[in-house]
Amino acid sequence: MRAVLQRVSEANCTVDGVITGSIATGFLVLLGIEDADIAEDLEWLAQKIVGMRVFGDENGLMNKALADVGGNILLISQFTLFASTKKGNRPGFTRAARSDKAIPLYEEMIKRLSLLLGKEIQTGIFGADMKISLVNDGPVTILMDTKNKD
């Protein structure tokens, strides 16, 4: 799994002009799922997302996690995080999981993040043409890959 976390002061997702998810302070998380992903990848990533301490404390240092600041998550599925750009100028997406594998993992990630954070997770619609608006706070953007845990 790959995730792009963006610390935001606000973010929302619309599909066909209808808002499907909206948050104030928190993380916009773009989530890519590949065929090789398993439950352990999901658990590791969910723990990391919820525990990531990139929100400012009283001294302006990045020491607080989502729960510490009452933050929320807007989770967006994004198969393009597994784009292969090695050959030519048209990306390939063969590493991205097909929907029969990706949807259950995406839905499980929603449940796991909600359980860990103790509140509902806002989402887009899997596979839809989504329009994402955000105000990146910082900017702070973190890349995570369960196959490369640097």
Image (cartoon, rainbow, N blue to C red):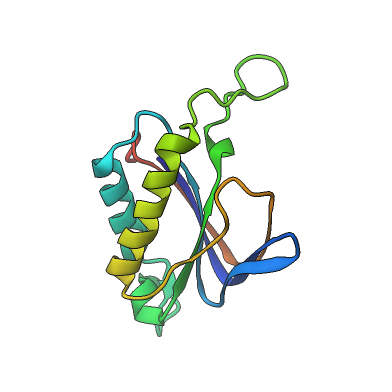
Where, by quadrant of the figure, is residue 65 drawn? bottom left
Classify 23 as above or below 126: below
| Residue 82 appearing in the image | yes
Q: Residue furthest right?
A: 17
Whole-percent x, y for residue 13 in the image: 64, 63
Q: Residue at x 42, y 49 (%)?
A: 106
Q: Nearer the viewer, residue 57 or 116?
A: 116
Quadrant occupied by the C terminus: top left
Q: Residue furthest front?
A: 100
Classify 23 as above or below 6: below
Q: Residue at x 53, y 23 (%)?
A: 94
**Residue 47 as seen in the image, left or right of residue 127:** left
Whole-percent x, y for residue 22 in the image: 58, 72
Classify 8 as above or below 143: below
Q: Residue at x 70, y 67 (%)?
A: 18
| Residue 52 appearing in the image | no
Quadrant occupied by the N terminus: top left
Q: Nearer the viewer, residue 63 or 6?
A: 6
Q: Residue furthest bottom?
A: 58
Number of numbered discs present? Answer: 0
Q: Residue at x 44, y 76 (%)?
A: 71
Whole-percent x, y for residue 136 in the image: 61, 65
Whole-percent x, y for residue 96 in the image: 49, 31
Q: Residue furthest top?
A: 87
